[in-house]
Image (spheres, helix red, strand yellow):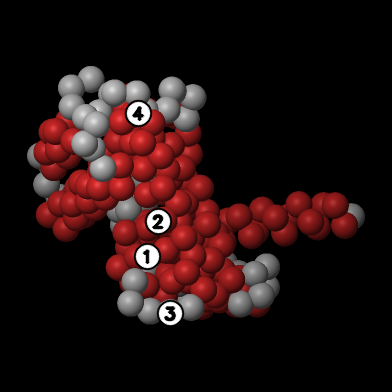
Amino acid sequence: MSPRHSAAEAAVTRATIVDHGVARASVEGLEGLTIGTLADELGLSKAGVVGPFGSKEALQLAVLKRATEIFKADVWDPAAELPAGRKRLAAVAENWISHLTRRVFPGGCFVTTAATEWDAREGPLHDAVAAAQGRWLATLRADAEVAVRAGELPRATDPAQLAFELNGVAMSLNQMLVLFDDKKAPARARRAVKRLLGPG
């Protein structure tokens, strides 16, 4: 077997472990990722699961990174080419609602699950979750700032507050869908976003 072929197989194995870990961690949390369970479900040895990462923590960080990439591809990327400001915020909000409603992650919003699990703890996983959430809030705030400057939102709008409230709508929607299976929740979320951003 050539080194190139071996490297390609190793990359596929690593990606498979991470993707499986994302689905499991969205339901059971990052701490719920156990090397033994992943090994059993994927038909690998424990060494075969942890080997590509070096440690359980490195695997958890890789799973978190992949989850944020999936979220970005589903929520941000389809709207990324729109002009910055209210129009893009509205598109992102709609993508976000769709993302949660379609349950792209089996356990609902991955970062919400991870944040609930790690918000009061310390260490690299706490820092990585906080950084991911911080980047997203900054992204929302930046478009809100553009919208205010362009007169697309009232001059008195606080961009940080708007980002906070949009995030709050998404977190509430996530809970209503996952905990209560509330079929009316997406419509409620859309009404809340419309109140925050105004008519299109």
Tell me the SS state at disc 1: helix
Counting every numbered tag in the picture gives 4
Q: Secondary structure at mark 2?
A: helix
Mark 2 neighbour density, 10 Å: few (under 14) some (14–19) many (20 or more) = some
- Mark 2, residue position: 133
Q: Nearer the viewer, residue 109 or 169?
A: 169
Viewer-nearest of labels 3 and 1?
A: 3
Q: Which residue is mark 1?
A: 114
> Which is in the foreground here, disc 2 or disc 1?
2
What amino acid type should be assigned to the residue bearing mark 3?
Glu
Q: Which residue is mark 3?
A: 122
Q: Are marks 4 and 3 in contact (CB under 8 Å)?
A: no
Q: Earlier in the sequence, mark 3 or mark 1?
A: 1
Q: Nearer the viewer, residue 188 or 47?
A: 188
Asked if residue 190 can be seen in this view, the reply is: no
Mark 1 vs 4: CB contact within 8 A: no
